[in-house]
Image: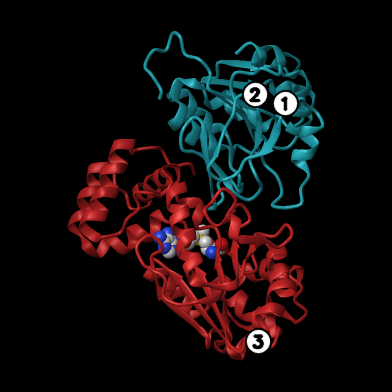
Chain colours: A cyan, B red
Amino acid sequence: MASDRKSDSKVELLLMGGSAGSLKVLLSLLPTLRQDLAFPVVIILHRKADPDSMLDVLLRNHTKLPVLEAEDKMTLQKGTIYLAPPDYHLLFESNKLVSLDYSEKLNYSRPSIDVSFQSAALACRDKLVAILLSGANADGVEGLKCVKSADGLVFVQDPDTAEVAYMPRQAIVHVKVDAVFKPEHFPGLINNL
Amino acid sequence: MLEPNVIKDEELEILLNDVFSVYGYDFTQYSKASLKRRVNRICVIDKFTSFAELRYHLLHHPEYLQRFVEEITVNVTEMFRDPGFFKALRDKVLPQLGTYPFIRIWLAGCSTGEEAYSMAILLREANLYNRSLIYATDLNPGVLEKAAKGIFPIAQMKLYSENYMLSGGLQDFSSYYMANYDVAKFDTKLSERIIFATHNLVSDSSFNEFQLVVCRNVLIYFDKELQNQVFTLFDESLDSLGFLALGAKETIRFSNLENRYKQLDTEKIWRKNM
Ligand SMILES: C[S@@+](CC[C@H](N)C(=O)[O-])C[C@H]1O[C@@H](n2cnc3c(N)ncnc32)[C@H](O)[C@@H]1O
């Protein structure tokens, strides 16, 4: 359960959202993650509704951490990377338990980053860290606001380093982000959370 | 737009308990994360500014219940959604069903009927339709009314026709409907052998024996315990050697059915043992 003690808040979940141009950042980040991460990492990428997509295989080839496609009512484990499956929204029942949802697309997207960020913010409060990467639409910006108002931490990729700057730029304009990072600094950031 | 969160966990509990005790609809074992989003959404659409206002309206206007139920459940659906699944039905399941003199199929959680019409098309193309009966059920009377009409937005037909072809369909998909302005009205011959009826998977029991039960994208809205309860209901409703088909992200793995059913390759279709 979330507690009100903000000072010793410990991260329980890391969420990363991205769209166009974010895969490259992820592929360079994943090999640098420490193997004993104390929390699960959940990745929400805009992807085609193609069930044969090999995105999980691709990610798996870039990290020693286990990579799983999130399944309905799956319990998240620390030190494991989860990928939101195509054509479903990913919701959080608690900081550890996820559900899938086939409701309307949001921002033309399913999975939508906003939907997962908001749901995780409600479930994890200040134990959540959310990172928004490169992308071409504003999906994620409203979600970051929810994370912020639940006292979670919000990081954004430096738009100048993003292949498509629109998404991180919108985030910086509309949300009080905790920090803006260049991709080469993400490993240090995440490994020290 | 992302709806702001206006409902607290405790308030959701209160609301669900109210709906159960006053109206008999039991959503208490539904996944809370989804319900919360739906309640937030209904507050925006129907302009309730607080939980208290929504609760008051719901409890004092019984005629609002149907809309409430329709909005807090997710009714999104498509024809031939996941074409690979329908291809597997065509290639692997229908030939088996064809060995029965009479085929009974249950589509549970059929929403506005797109899946039922897809199934009718498959059966017709396999020359099995005239000896089949499709029971298409849902807990929402509203979606069933729409389903019975067989009228869908014309704007969707391009996608449906692509899905249909990917599922192995060889006909001209537009031969199944009449275009009229912005809607497509499906051939009434397709609904001749479909019975649309309300059935609540949470509280209603088994009502027949089937050779095929299809329930896709409904169980993801239930908690594990309720999922298991519904699996038992399906088990009771299936003939031995009957087929159970679930949505792309649903599974009987880890359930009480696991040992008595065998999965057909990689599709979400399982066959009951003898
Ligand atoms: C997302 S739709 C799935 C439609 C279709 N099967 C598909 O996969 O495209 C979920 C449907 O389940 C229905 N449903 C939810 N709870 C139910 C219950 N307890 N009993 C029967 N149907 C239910 C909803 O009304 C909705 O129409």
User: Distance from label 2 to label 3 (Cα)?
Assistant: 51 Å
Q: What residue do we see at 49% from left, 30% from top?
A: A95
Q: Which mark is residue A79?
A: 2
Amino acid type indicated by mark 2: Gly
Q: Which residue is mark 3?
A: B128
Q: For the residue labelled by badge 3, is the local secondary structure a helix, a strand or a loop?
A: loop
Q: For the residue labelled by badge 2, is the local secondary structure a helix, a strand or a loop?
A: loop
Q: Residues within 10 Å of mark 1 (few under 14, many from 20)?
A: some
The verdict on a common chain for dots 1 and 2 is: yes
Q: Residue furthest left?
A: B60
Nearest the eye: B132 or A12: B132
Labelled pair 1, 2 in contact (Cβ < 8 Å): yes
User: Distance from label 1 to label 2 (Cα)?
Assistant: 7 Å
Percent position of residue A148, x then y: 48, 23
Q: What residue do we see at 60% from left, 64% from top?
A: B245
Percent position of residue B222, x then y: 45, 51
* For residue B21, side relative to residue B191 (left or right): left
Q: Which residue is mark 1?
A: A65
Residue B256 to residue B62: above or below: above
Percent position of residue A153, x then y: 53, 19
Q: Residues within 10 Å of mark 2 (few under 14, many from 20)?
A: some
Res. B117 image quadrant: bottom right
Q: Residue furthest front?
A: B274
Q: What residue do we see at 20% from left, 60% from top?
A: B61
* For residue B62, side relative to residue B238 (left or right): left
Nearest the eye: B139 or B209: B209
Percent position of residue A97, x then y: 51, 36
